[in-house]
Image (cartoon, rainbow, N blue to C red):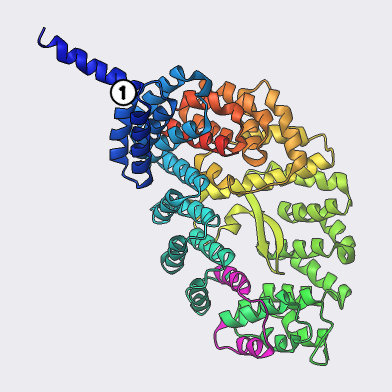
Amino acid sequence: MKFFIPALLLSVTFLSAEFNPEKEKLCKELTSYNLLIHNYTEAVSRATDGVKHFPKSQEMRELYIESLAKVRDEKRLLQSWQKFSRDFEHNKYKDSVLENVAWGVIHNAQGSENLATKFTSLIAASIQNDAYSVETIKKTLGESNAILREVALQFCLNFGDQVLKDEIVRLLKEEKVFEVRKKAIEVAQRLKIDEARPILESLLGDEKVSYQEKSQIVAALINYYDSISNEELKELSESSQPGHRLLACELYNHFDLKEQAGLLEELIYDSHKQVRLSALSIMGNLKLTELNGRKIEEVLKSALEDSNPQISLIATWALLHKNPVLTKAKLRHFLLHSDQTIRLQAAGIIGYSLSEMRSLAEEMFEIHPDLYVRANLAFFLVSHRVKVKEASEQLFNLFNAKEMFMFKEVYPSHLCILAPTAMVLEQGNPEAFYPVASLYYQMAQLEILNILAILEDPRAKEAMAVFLDNHHSDITTLSLRSVLKLEDKQAFELMRDFLTHQDKHKRVEAAIVLAMFKRDKEALTVLQETFVDVNRDLKQIILMAIGEIASKDSIPFLMDIVYEPSQSLRVNAAAALVQCLRN
């Protein structure tokens, strides 16, 4: 009896607390206050006490879920949401509650060593857009995996925080991997980071920096200029540093400085090959017919006969608008050169100047033995609706080639040609960046598919089937794809037909591509229905694709996956859930 009375009194106290509005209000306020000051351990303690005393209070249960998410207690967090969903079924998919559950799962995985989990956490962080995002991206910029660093750099574009700018500047100084350095240069330029400018200028004078990288540095530095005086232009043109002279050339083009083009004459005979190529390219872009009172043929005479075929080729381009007859003869010669890079550049120049070079383009398209030369000419012929049937045939043949190919930017400035992937990545490390190469190969294939679809070529559907058969989604590739845009509308319309294909692999791959590139809701049913029958790697990719579509219709499906035993699947589901909630 002596034990019964205190127990009874205690139960009465708890019972009275449950119906005490003032005590409930105080408990909520204390929990909220501790969450506000980031004293999360105390917030959990207060919330635990509140839920125990006021189990019917939905607001108290929500604060409890938020507190557990902040301390990254994933197990108790998921258990608490299960109970919440039963007790408050009409509100079980409340956005704020689900977002706390999702971030609790994601934050708990932050220290994971699993590469796929790191990718997912990074993508999720870019969505959250707060202090946690900045912390996660900063940490990823120091990761050992080069592709992780590259993706993190891309996400820096969404933030203006100085701590991330400092990391970008650090990478400009220290990064060893070529592809990551390129991305750091691009991001520094797009964010116009003032501290990056002197570093970029110093790299222009570094003999160890490759010409390909210097071209990108020049492109970045141009964006720091709103205008340029004649004195600045002259100083750059006469600098002892070839990088500065290269920058001068591009500034002529950027500001269309035809009236000040006299200094280009010195630069087309510069001691540095890249400066000469740039000066010649700019002369062609400006369509100069004379320079310093001399006819352009006279100015270019030596360059046209240069022993370096690339110099001679770009000098030919500079002469195009003044002497198309001589240009045509020279380009015919370069199309038969032993160096494939020269052949492809010549094909690109011919295609770019098709109105003047149509007869040569048609002739060489018919007889040239190099598939890539024919394919590059085919691209231009198709765009002018010339030899459409034959050009489609060549593009289809390239599509089915055994080696990977992609677009490469070459001189003249901003001319893009199709080339074997190995040629494009010659300055980098193709093996280390295979996922990147694979992505750009797929994009080049989709470009061809789009052309075939626009032309209503009957082989377009066959090519799409081949693409989907050989297309194997990869986590790192999809992480990169999530920040890219593609507008091949006809190809994607064709791909929708494969959502109902009898082959499961074709269905799921079509759904993934449509989701990742087009956020196409029609792909959702395929993605969710096939999830249970595929391996774990493909399940992760399906969850990423569902996240890209970001439809609230996916929330019940994703909340089921949040309880999967695999941490990587839970994190992917949580990241997709955040995207759906933020849409």
Q: Main secondary structure of the magenta part?
A: helix
Q: Please, is residue 402 above or below residue 327 in the view?
A: above
Mark yes or no: residue 111 visible.
no
Task: Give the magenta-colored segment's residue range.
Answer: 213-242
Residue lying furthest left: 2
Q: Please, is residue 396 above or below residue 85 in the view?
A: below
Asked if residue 371 lies in the magenta stretch, the reply is: no
Query: Which of the pair 160/251 is nearer the observer?
Result: 160
Q: Quadrant of residue 106?
A: top left
Asked if residue 241 lies in the magenta stretch, the reply is: yes
Q: Secondary structure at mark 1?
A: helix
Percent position of residue 12, x then y: 26, 16
Query: Which of the pair 332/288 is nearer the observer?
Result: 288
Query: Which of the pair 503/100 is nearer the observer?
Result: 100
Q: Quadrant of residue 272?
A: bottom right
* Image side of residue 556 versus residue 467, left or right: left
Percent position of residue 59, x then y: 43, 29
Q: Residue at label 1?
A: 17
Percent position of residue 267, x then y: 67, 85
Amino acid type assigned to the residue bearing label 1 in the image: Ala
Residue lying furthest bottom: 293
Which residue sits at x=81%, y=60%?
351
Query: Which of the pair 240/199 is nearer the observer?
Result: 199
Percent position of residue 524, x then y: 63, 28
